[in-house]
Image (tube, grey):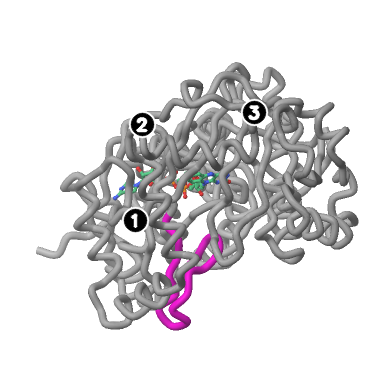
């Protein structure tokens, strides 16, 4: 007997993965479209317990003003996207449970870095009118510990702005969910927590998703499962030109040493943020330094079962091997990776890491720095197997009525912009009976509140 499924039982959209990207998409689909039946499928008991968890990432809302590895073009895009998150929290979080506002700066130490920042300021000042070029005296007024104990011979320059936001992306995800389910009683929005997807397969004109031994059917699918998105894409024959270099990031804590975020000038060639320091999002009495970037063959931090999945994702192909070899044969990258591996070791790691921290806070004492056990997720950096290079930022793979997002930093800062673009794509997948009030979505997140 052929089993027939009533069309009513089929979801319009299934979102696989309830991190900040999946929940932002849920928010957009629920509130700004006529999509009536949505499933959010998450393997953990709650949303945002992987990279979007408050302790997994650097809690920065990246605008591109102090991230010196962003080009003007990239900073323009990230600024637009981050402004949406800023507007969301200003509008919906009056008690500041999701965010804290701090000033922030990128610090140049020495003549070469100082010249680089001065030049950069000229290029970026129109895009970021609040950005100021400040010198030693003003830096000392804003961040006394950055100057205290530092040799006078070091030239000091910073690009500084009062407009810095530390975001608890876990609470942001929870807010997206409550603003989706609670406010749309006319829609079917099923939150399937504790539901681990093991397979996605096309069937006729829709998809069948297998999870916990059951099947869920959907006309269109958004796979927002972090590093696992590439595994799912490959299982359907997509994304064959990509592999992942998983960079785990760890942190160290110190008693309050900084009043706002202090970034360093980024190393060229590397897609990772330079080590920086900032107060904890909900606890200014602690300063967090990091993240490191330790390469680990895993898709999720501390989840050793994902080692096998990592190798499945990388594909043990000749292309993958040649790409990793090409990346690691660059001595800057290799040296950086070896160093970052050691930062996590007891004693010797701290001994080496404190030299980086002292570039930011010269007077910090060895005993003040503590390894933040259990903190730090994994950034799935994209390796392009064609160009054999590491790519900066997120990757999107488009298939037939299905899309996949792989989201290293600044994936959390851009979650609402990504949701906007994905909503538009999903509406196109679903066909002419569906609409997206894109103008309304953008207007709600761009107006000053
Ligand atoms: C050390 C570090 C520092 C970072 N700092 C910043 C920063 O300061 N600013 C910034 O913008 N970004 C930062 N990032 C990046 C940011 O954390 C990510 O871009 C963002 O959290 C990605 O969100 P996501 O929803 O795509 O993925 P995740 O939050 O990882 O969510 C993916 C979800 O998919 C679920 N899932 C996976 N597989 C399955 C399955 N089979 N079935 C069902 N569910 C599944 C997972 O359980 C998880 O909940 C940092 C990342 C790291 C690791």
2 and 1 marks in contact (CB < 8 Å)? no
User: Which residue lies at the image location 44% right of the left edge and 61% below the top edge?
Assistant: 335
Where, quadrant-wise, is the N terminus in this rendering? bottom left
Q: Name the residue under label 2.
A: 374
- Residue 374: image location, x then y, percent: 36, 31
> Which residue, given by chain and number where applicable, does mark 1 sit on?
228
- Apparent side of residue 405 relative to residue 81 in the rendered image (left or right): left
Label 3 element class:
strand
Q: Which of 79 and 420 is in front in this view?
A: 79
Q: How far apart are marks 1 and 3 (CA)?
A: 28 Å
Q: Which mark is residue 99?
A: 3
**Secondary element type, mark 2:** loop
Q: Of helix, strand and loop, which one carries label 1? A: helix
59 on left or right of 86 = left
Of marks 1 and 3, which one's residue comes earlier in the chain? 3
Instruction: Judge left or right: residue 94 versus residue 332.
Output: right
Q: Does the residue labelled 1 lie within 8 Å of ligand 1?
A: yes
Of label 3 and label 2, which has the lower sequence position? 3
Does residue 286 appear in this view? yes
Sequence-first disc among 2 and 1: 1
The one of 156 and 292 positioned closer to us in this rendering: 156
Q: How crowded is mark 3: few (under 14 residues within 10 Å), some or many (20 or more)?
A: many
Q: Which residue lies furthest to the left in this view?
A: 1
Magenta residues (range): 380-396
- Quarter occupied by residue 286: top right
> Which of the two residues, 345 or 377, is positioned nearer the viewer here?
345
Instruction: Give how far apart the Cα atoms at labels 2 and 1 are.
Output: 21 Å
Are dots 1 and 3 in contact, CB under 8 Å?
no
382 in the magenta segment: yes
Q: Locate residue 366, reporting x and y percent.
A: 48, 26
Place of residue 125 in the rendered image (x, y in percent of width and height, measured from the top left): 88, 54
Which quadrant would the C terminus be assigned to in this image?
A: top right
């Amino acid at each position: 007997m052929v089993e027939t499924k009533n069309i009513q039982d089929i979801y319009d959209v299934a979102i696989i993965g309830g991190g900040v990207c999946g929940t932002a998409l849920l928010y957009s689909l629920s509130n700004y479209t006529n999509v009536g039946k949505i499933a959010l499928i998450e393997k953990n008991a709650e949303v945002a317990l992987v990279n979007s968890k408050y302790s997994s990432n650097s809690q920065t809302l990246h605008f591109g003003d102090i991230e010196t590895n962003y080009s003007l073009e990239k900073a323009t895009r990230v600024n637009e996207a981050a402004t949406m998150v800023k507007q969301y929290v200003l509008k919906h979080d009056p008690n500041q449970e999701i965010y804290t506002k701090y000033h922030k700066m990128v610090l140049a130490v020495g003549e070469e870095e100082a010249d680089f920042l001065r030049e950069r300021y000229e290029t970026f000042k129109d895009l970021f009118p609040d950005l100021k070029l400040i010198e030693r005296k003003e830096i000392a007024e804003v961040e006394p510990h950055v100057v205290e104990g530092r040799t006078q011979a070091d030239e000091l320059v910073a690009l500084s702005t009062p407009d810095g936001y530390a975001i608890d992306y876990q609470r942001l995800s929870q807010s997206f969910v409550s603003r989706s389910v609670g406010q749309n009683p006319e829609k079917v929005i099923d939150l399937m927590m504790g539901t681990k997807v093991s397979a996605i397969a096309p069937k006729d004109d829709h998809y069948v998703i297998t999870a916990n031994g059951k099947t869920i059917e959907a006309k269109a699918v958004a796979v927002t499962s972090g590093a696992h998105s590439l595994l799912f894409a490959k299982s359907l024959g997509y994304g064959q030109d990509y592999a992942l270099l998983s960079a785990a990031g760890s942190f160290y804590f110190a008693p309050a040493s900084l009043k706002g975020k202090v970034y360093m000038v980024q190393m060229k060639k590397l897609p990772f943020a330079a080590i920086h320091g900032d107060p904890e999002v909900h606890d200014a009495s602690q300063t967090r330094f990091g993240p490191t970037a330790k390469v680990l063959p895993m898709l999720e931090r501390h989840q050793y079962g994902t080692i096998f999945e990592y190798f499945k994702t990388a594909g043990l192909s000749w292309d993958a091997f040649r790409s990793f070899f090409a990346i690691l044969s660059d001595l800057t990258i290799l040296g950086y990776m070896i160093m970052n591996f050691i930062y996590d070791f007891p004693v010797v790691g701290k001994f080496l890491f404190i030299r980086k921290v002292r570039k930011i806070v010269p007077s910090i004492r060895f005993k003040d720095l503590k390894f933040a056990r259990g903190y730090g997720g994994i950034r799935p950096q994209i390796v392009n197997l064609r160009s054999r290079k590491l790519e900066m930022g997120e990757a999107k793979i488009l298939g037939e009525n299905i899309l996949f997002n792989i989201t290293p930093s600044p994936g959390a800062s851009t979650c609402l912009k990504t949701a906007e673009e994905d909503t538009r794509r999903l509406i196109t997948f679903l066909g002419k009976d569906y609409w997206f009030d894109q103008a309304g979505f953008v207007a709600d997140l761009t107006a000053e509140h």
